[in-house]
Image (cartoon, grey):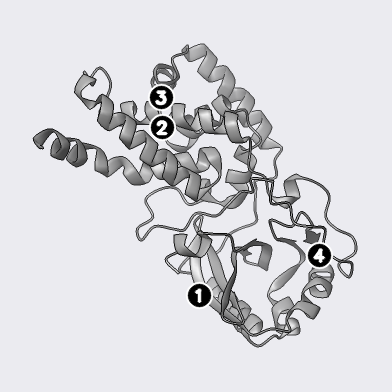
């Protein structure tokens, strides 16, 4: 009993950071939760053999990394629609069929207290990570996000410092061309951002397409997994949305990935979680994650 209490007391403080690490690696909050559970179960079973040659934190990350690498090898990467093809050019046409077979990127609800870098949790960054080979992904997160030393990462991955530095260089080069630089972002407490979000939710609830378009930038992007179709441009978004605002929507502000988000209910039923990129110009990107089992529950809804 004392052994179990000791294990929980010493390892529990790392649970949240391991969750966000696994999420960055695999791109799914649900899968990340499962991987953390797997990590803690493996660690608990092996705890008697932990000799303290590394810190407990490093030991847990080693177990979590191995679990993530296996998951990525099994399941592959998680894309967004924009990662699979060009935007649609006819918003009046029927949408392409959903692709339930694709393991889509999923949002992660913000914790009550955000301890990690919000920039490194943004969907654009996590989506770009999915295109890196699994070990490069781990190296980049550990080195550039969690600021581990190269020697520490080499020990964790059981490789050389030279191999870690080489992997990091390749990963940085690939991400440099991934359009991660979003425009100046309004801070979460910024009255401008709150005003934009209030206007956006009110427009949805009032089925007011004109008001909705006033908070969307001219070159905004609209994505909606599991549909592969996506659009770029205010006019394309208008034409896509206008005939679909014929229901009663309720919009509840939430937060995901360090960004403002909206839980949409359509005719009283869970419909979608929308994650918004808000800049000083307005909303530049809207990713509408249509409800799947567990998505609303993961937000406590």
Q: Is disc 2 surrounded by few (<14), some (14 to 19) or many (20+) residues within 10 Å?
A: many
Q: Quadrant of residue 267?
A: bottom right
Q: Earlier in the sequence, mark 4 or mark 1?
A: 1
Nearer the observer, 293 or 55: 293
Location of the N terminus by quadrant is: top left
Q: Which residue is mark 3?
A: 149
Helix, strand, or loop for circle 4? loop
The reply to whether residue 187 is in sight is no
Q: Which residue is mark 1?
A: 191
What percent of the width, then of the height, locates residue 201? 59, 79
First-in-chain label (2 vs 3): 2
Mark 4 nearby-residue class (10 Å; few <14, some 14–19, many ≥20)? some
From the viewer's side, name the closer residue of 283 and 299: 299
Q: Nearer the viewer, mark 3 or mark 1?
A: 3
Binning the other alpha carbons within 10 Å of mark 3 as few (below 14), some (14 to 19) or many (20 upward) gives: few
User: First in sequence: mark 2 or mark 4?
Assistant: 2
Q: Quadrant of residue 157?
A: top left
Residue ranking furthest to the left = 2
Give how far apart the Cα atoms at labels 2 and 3 are.
18 Å
Residue at 54% x, 14% y is: 163
């Amino acid at each position: 009993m004392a052994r179990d209490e000791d294990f929980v007391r010493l390892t529990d403080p790392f649970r949240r950071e391991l969750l966000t690490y696994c999420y960055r690696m695999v791109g799914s909050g649900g899968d990340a939760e499962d991987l953390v559970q797997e990590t803690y179960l493996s660690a608990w079973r092996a705890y008697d053999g932990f000799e303290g040659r590394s810190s407990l934190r490093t030991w847990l990350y080693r177990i979590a990394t191995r679990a993530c690498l296996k998951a990525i090898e099994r399941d592959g990467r998680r894309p967004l629609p924009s990662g699979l093809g060009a935007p649609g050019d006819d918003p009046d046409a029927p949408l392409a069929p959903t692709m339930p077979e694709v393991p889509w990127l999923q949002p992660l609800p913000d914790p009550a207290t955000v301890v990690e870098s919000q920039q490194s949790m943004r969907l654009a960054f996590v989506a770009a990570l999915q295109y890196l080979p699994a070990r490069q992904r781990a190296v980049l997160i550990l080195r550039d996000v969690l600021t581990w030393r190269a020697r520490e990462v080499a020990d964790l991955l059981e490789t050389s410092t030279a191999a870690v530095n080489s992997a990091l260089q390749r990963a940085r080069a690939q991400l440099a061309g991934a359009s991660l630089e979003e425009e100046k972002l309004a801070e979460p407490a910024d009255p401008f951002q709150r005003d934009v979000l209030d206007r956006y939710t009110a427009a949805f609830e009032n089925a007011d397409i004109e008001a909705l378009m006033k908070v969307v930038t001219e070159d905004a992007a609209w994505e909606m997994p599991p549909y592969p179709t996506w659009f770029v441009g205010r006019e394309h978004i208008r034409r896509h949305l206008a005939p679909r605002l014929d229901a009663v929507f309720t919009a509840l502000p939430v937060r995901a990935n360090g960004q403002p988000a909206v839980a949409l209910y359509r005719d009283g039923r869970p419909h979608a979680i929308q994650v918004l990129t808000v800049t000083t110009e307005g909303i530049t990107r809207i990713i509408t994650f249509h409800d799947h089992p567990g998505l609303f529950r993961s937000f406590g809804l």
